[in-house]
Image (tube, rainbow, N blue to C red):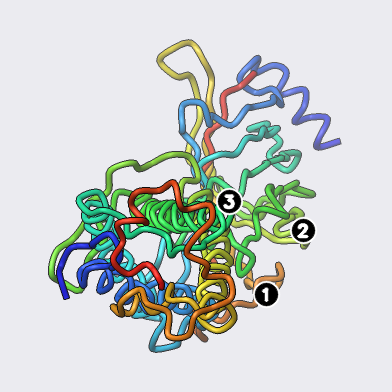
Amino acid sequence: MAAKNSDSRYGWVAIAFHWLMVPAVLGLFALGWWMRQLSYYDPWYRQGPEIHKAIGILLLIALLLRLCWKCLNRRPAELPGTPRWQALAARLTHGGLYLLLLASMLSGYLISTADGRAIDVFGLFSVPATLQGLTNQEDIAGEVHEILAWTLMALVALHALAALKHHFIDRDANLLRMLGKRAKPATPGKSCSPEGQRGSNPASNSNPSTVK
Amino acid sequence: MKQIAIFLLASLLGATAQAAEYVIDTKGAHAFIQFRIKHLGYSWLYGRFDDFSGSFQYDENNPEASSINVNIDVNSLDSNHAERDKHLRGEDFLFVEKYPSATFKSTRYEVTGDGKGKLSGDLTLRGITKPITIDVTHIGGGQDPWGGYRQGFTGTTEFALKDFGIDYNLGPASQTVEMILDVEGIRL
C-alpha cells in the first residue's frame, strides 16, 4: 500500500493516523470522565490526570501532523453515486471533528497550565505554559473542555454510525477504504449507480475503481 | 457607671480614643484571609481568598463594643495550584457557582486579656450559617506615615468542613480547616 493517498484510496499513513487516534480519543474521553469521580485516596487519583494530560499532548501532536499530512495529500474522490448532500455532510463532519479535537485539547492544556505549570509527558518532555493567569482561567477552560468533549463524542458517534450505515445498509466501500481496501464494493449496492450527478466530475471519470 | 466614666475619659483623651469605623485595607492589601488544612496529616496546605471587603468598629478604650462585617468573594480562592483551585471551587468543596460569597458578621466581642479577646459571630459559607468564635489579638494601631490612622488585628479560628456542607473525604487528619485572619483597618 502506498504511503500517500491516491484518487481512489487512502495511503497507509492516513489510515494509520485515523485508527491510532480512535482509541486515543475514546480512551481520553473515558479516562477524563472516570478520573473525575475518583476519591482522594484512590491510587489513580494522581495517575489518572497525569496520563490523561500526557496522552492529550501526544494526541495534539499527532493531530497537527495529521493535518499537515492531509494538506500534502489529495483527498480520495467520493464513491460514485454519493449524493451531494451526503458528501457535504461528511466533509462538514470531518472538519468538525478536527476542530473539536483541536479545541478540546487546547482547552485542556489551558486548565493545567493556568498557573504557569508545564505539562509533563511521561517524563519524556514537558510542554510549558503560554497563556496563563487569566481570571478563573482553569474554571472557564474546564467548562469549555467538558462541553467540547461531549460535543466531540456526539459527532464521533454520528461519524461512526454513518460509516456503519455505508457498510451495512448501503453496502458500499466507504468503511473498507479506511481499512485500506480498494474502493470496490463487495456487492453492488442499490445506491451505487456510476452515472448521474458525478458524470461531470473528471476525477471520478478517470477513477480506475469506478464500478462497472 | 463604669462605662460612663470610660466614655468621659475617652472623650477627654480626644480623637484617638473615640469609637470609630475602620475600613479594611484591601486596597493596599494589608489584610489577608488565609486557611490551612492538613495534607494527609503530614503537612499544612495553605490557601487564601484574594477578594474581600469589610469594615469594623473599634474603640481602644471600649474594645468590648467592637464589631466587624466581612464579605468574601469565594471565587477568589488561591492555593497556588490551578487544578486544585478548580476542584476547591467546584461542587465537592465550596461550590462557588451556587454560593459565590461568604460572610462573617460579629455578634459580640469578649476581652480575655491585654489586647486579646474572643470574637463571636455568624459565618455564612456554602449557604450555611453557623456561629464561630475567633481568637483575636490586637497587634497595634496609630498614625501611619501618610496622614491616616490604622488599627491591626490577627485572629484564628477552626471549624469542621462538614459543618458547612463539605463532606468530600480528604482523610481523617483533614476534617477541620483553620482560618488565619489578618486585618488592618484605616479609620474613616
The nearer-to-camera label among 3 and 2 is 2
The nearer-to-camera label among 3 and 1 is 1
Q: Are marks 1 and 2 in contact (CB under 8 Å)?
A: no
Going from N to C along the chain, the mark reached first, 1 or 2, is 2
CA neighbours of label 1 inside 10 A, class few (<14), some (14 to 19), many (20+): few
The residue labelled by disc 3 is: B136
Going from N to C along the chain, the mark reached first, 3 or 2, is 2
Q: Residue A155: horizontal and vertical position, in percent?
A: 55, 64
| Residue depicted at 23% across the width and 62% down the height | A5
Type of amino acid under label 2: Gly
As measured in the structure, the alpha-carbon distance from the residue carrying label 1 to the one carrying label 2 is 13 Å
Type of amino acid under label 1: Lys
Nearer to me, B93 or B173: B93
Residue B162 disc label: 1
Residue B19 in the image: above or below residue A133: above
Q: Is residue B35 left or right of residue A177?
A: right
As measured in the structure, the alpha-carbon distance from the residue carrying label 3 to the one carrying label 1 is 24 Å
| Residue depicted at 71% across the width and 26% down the height | B19
